[in-house]
Image: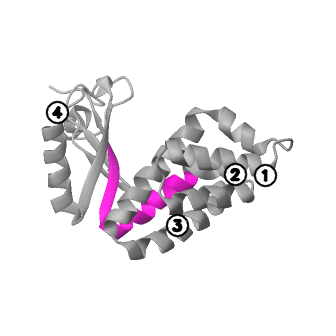
């Protein structure tokens, strides 16, 4: 339900920003992320805008000050005003996510997540992103997450695609079956 509320706002911002070019989209995306972060990290901001005792004029003044401090472009500030007018500022993080999806589609970028036993250097992550980009035919941006239980290898998720190069998966292939949760071979090997 909340994504359904957020999506039209993201689409509207995308529609009015797209004619200004790719740099304007990137700038709006970063600004929207900053604003979403502020509202997520400071829940008292949401409460302030939802207070019925705070006058509309005061809320607009607070939004303008917030926009100035976060250095938001005019179109992003107008979006915040529209969200506040319709009592939907609490959906700002979802609006930012939906806007990112639209921008990624525009730029031909697929975002994903890679699970690794330990963090890797940026160069290694870039190399993995390049390899995946050649496989899927579009640019790839990965967010890495440490999972020590993997021991070695990695698992990548790009939407519905999963690339499993983990040690566990290699052992499953070697054993000719799957390993039970305890990690022992499903059959006895002689």
Q: Report crowding for label 2: few under 14, some 14 to 19, many 20 or more residues within 10 A (C-alpha).
A: some
Q: Left or right? Give the position of 170 relative to 160.
A: left
Where residue 123 appears, x then y in whole percent?
13, 40
Q: Earlier in the sequence, mark 4 or mark 2?
A: 2
Where residue 112 appears, x then y in whole percent?
34, 49
Q: Check if mark 2's residue and mark 1's residue have beta carbons within 8 Å.
A: yes
Give the residue number, with chain letter if any, for mark 3: 13
Is residue 110 visible to us here?
yes
Give the residue number, with chain letter if any, for mark 1: 56
- Give the position of the C terminus as an image quadrant: top left
**Viewer-side label of 3, 4:** 3
Front-most of residues 77 and 4: 77
In the rendered image, the vertical position of residue 86 relative to residue 115, given as above or below: below
Mark 4 → mark 2, Cα distance in angstroms: 44 Å
Q: Report crowding for label 4: few under 14, some 14 to 19, many 20 or more residues within 10 A (C-alpha).
A: few
Q: Secondary structure at mark 1?
A: helix
**Viewer-side label of 4, 1:** 1
The magenta segment is: 94-113
- Give the position of the N terminus as an image quadrant: bottom right
Q: Earlier in the sequence, mark 1 or mark 3?
A: 3
Give the residue number, with chain letter if any, for mark 4: 121
């Amino acid at each position: 339900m909340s994504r359904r509320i957020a999506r039209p706002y993201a689409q509207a911002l995308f529609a009015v920003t797209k004619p200004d070019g790719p740099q304007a989209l990137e700038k709006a995306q970063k600004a929207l992320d900053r604003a979403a972060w502020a509202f997520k990290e400071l829940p008292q901001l949401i409460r302030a805008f939802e207070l019925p005792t705070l006058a509309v004029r005061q809320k607009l003044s607070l939004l303008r000050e917030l926009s100035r401090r976060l250095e938001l472009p005019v179109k992003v500030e107008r979006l915040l005003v529209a969200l506040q007018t319709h009592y939907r500022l609490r959906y700002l993080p979802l609006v930012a996510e939906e806007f990112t999806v639209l921008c990624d589609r525009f730029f031909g970028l697929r975002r994903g997540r890679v699970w690794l036993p330990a963090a890797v250097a940026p160069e290694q992550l870039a190399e993995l992103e390049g390899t995946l980009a050649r496989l899927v035919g579009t640019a790839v941006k990965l967010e890495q997450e440490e999972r020590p239980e993997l021991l070695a290898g990695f698992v990548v998720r790009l939407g519905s695609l999963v690339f499993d190069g983990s040690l566990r998966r290699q052992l499953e292939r070697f054993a000719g079956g799957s390993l039970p949760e305890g990690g022992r071979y499903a059959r006895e090997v002689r």
